[in-house]
Image (spheres, helix red, strand yellow):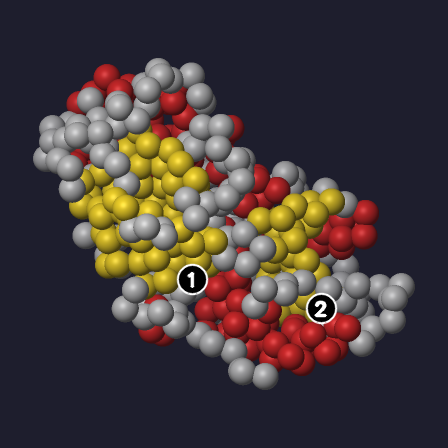
Amino acid sequence: MAGPIHEFSHLPRPKANVKSAWRVRRDARAEGDPPIVGLIYNPRSHHNRGQDLTSKISPDVFVAQPGNRDQLPEALARLAERGIDLLVINGGDGTVRDVLTCGEPIFGDDWPAVAVLPKGKTNALAVDLGGPSDWTLQCAVDAYENGKRVKRSPMAITPLDQPDARVLGFILGAGAFTLGTKAGQSAHKLGAFNSLAVGVTTFWGILQAVFGTRANPWRRGAKMDLRLAPSGVPLEHSGLGEPERRLILLASTLERFPGGTKPFGSLGKGLKLAALDQISRWMTLMLPAILFEFGPKNLRKRGFHQLVAQSFEMELDDQFILDGEAFPAGRYRVETGPEIDFVAP
């Protein structure tokens, strides 16, 4: 969606009475009735530009095309008031982030089933769910009846100085990851998307980190104070480089990633955390192998930390990225959000 969402104090909020109205309407329908479908269509998503809806819209499908994020709560509220069984999100990872963030005050911990039509520049959630790139609205509706359900919980990121404001998303990164996202935008302009964009930006980042000096931002990273909940114990540091800095921070609740990469190794379910200290040039050259689980042993001693966390707090001196968009430096709590049933083929 267009417009900034990184100002937590300016997050759009729905009307307070929408949640109960949605549940009453949904529970009132008779068993065997066709599902009521709500579609959030982002015309600005990469594969939607210059196009209109191509699927035949049935009387049980209600479409909302909010022009910006400020209009999302009202659009979601209208769909909720119809008692939808299936919420279809037509857009990329950023659109999913915005819909989940604005929808949480409405649906809380009791969401309708959600389907994602991967129409953005990046579609990591769709990759994790196994949805094909050409998935249509009709395919999603059919899968609601005959497909499978995949349970996923987005991360919830809350600024510690604004406990009533939080954003939901699936991939969080900081340090060189922020630089990589900016490089990825350049790759998009050259026509590289999804797995290809991941490969291009990873290759470029490794070159910078191997041949650059400590002053090079790709090797310098960012100051990070990472503390694991509930104990508040700092995340261990290998002692390589400056102890208050990390080269990369990555967190996610996804289980499969674009390009077949495995940034969290064999870790599967839950909130996963990977942190990379200021490692040696040799270890930097090994990063592609590590991402495919062919790297050396004793990764923690070599500065590469992978773990599952109940939640954690982070204090950053630079921006972090959540599903492709930059958020400001500061102190945040990262935890698991509501569990949602996603529809998959």
Q: Is residue 187 shown above or below 25?
A: above
Residue beneath the point at 18% across and 45% down: 223
Q: Which structural element holds mark 1? A: strand
Kindly tell me whether residue 78 is visible in this rendering: no
Residue beneath the point at 72% across and 51% down: 140
Task: Tell me the residue that label 2 is attached to.
Answer: 84
Q: Where does residue 214 sit, x and y in percent of width and height?
A: 11, 31
Q: Nearer the viewer, residue 150 or 328?
A: 150
Q: Where does residue 321 sit, x and y in percent of width and height?
A: 34, 50
Q: Quadrant of residue 306?
A: top left
Q: Where does residue 21 sit, x and y in percent of width and height?
A: 67, 80
Residue beneath the point at 26% across and 24% down: 301
14 lies left or right of 344: left
Task: Tell me the residue that label 1 is attached to.
Answer: 167
237 lies left or right of 272: left
Instruction: Name the residue type under label 2.
Output: Ile
Residue beneath the point at 30% across and 26% down: 300
Instruction: Name the residue type under label 1.
Output: Val
Q: Where does residue 55 sit, x and y in percent of width and height?
A: 73, 56
Point out the residue furthest to the front here: 231
Q: Is residue 35 shown above or below 312?
A: below
Q: Is residue 332 shown above or below 197?
A: below
- Disc number at residue 279? none
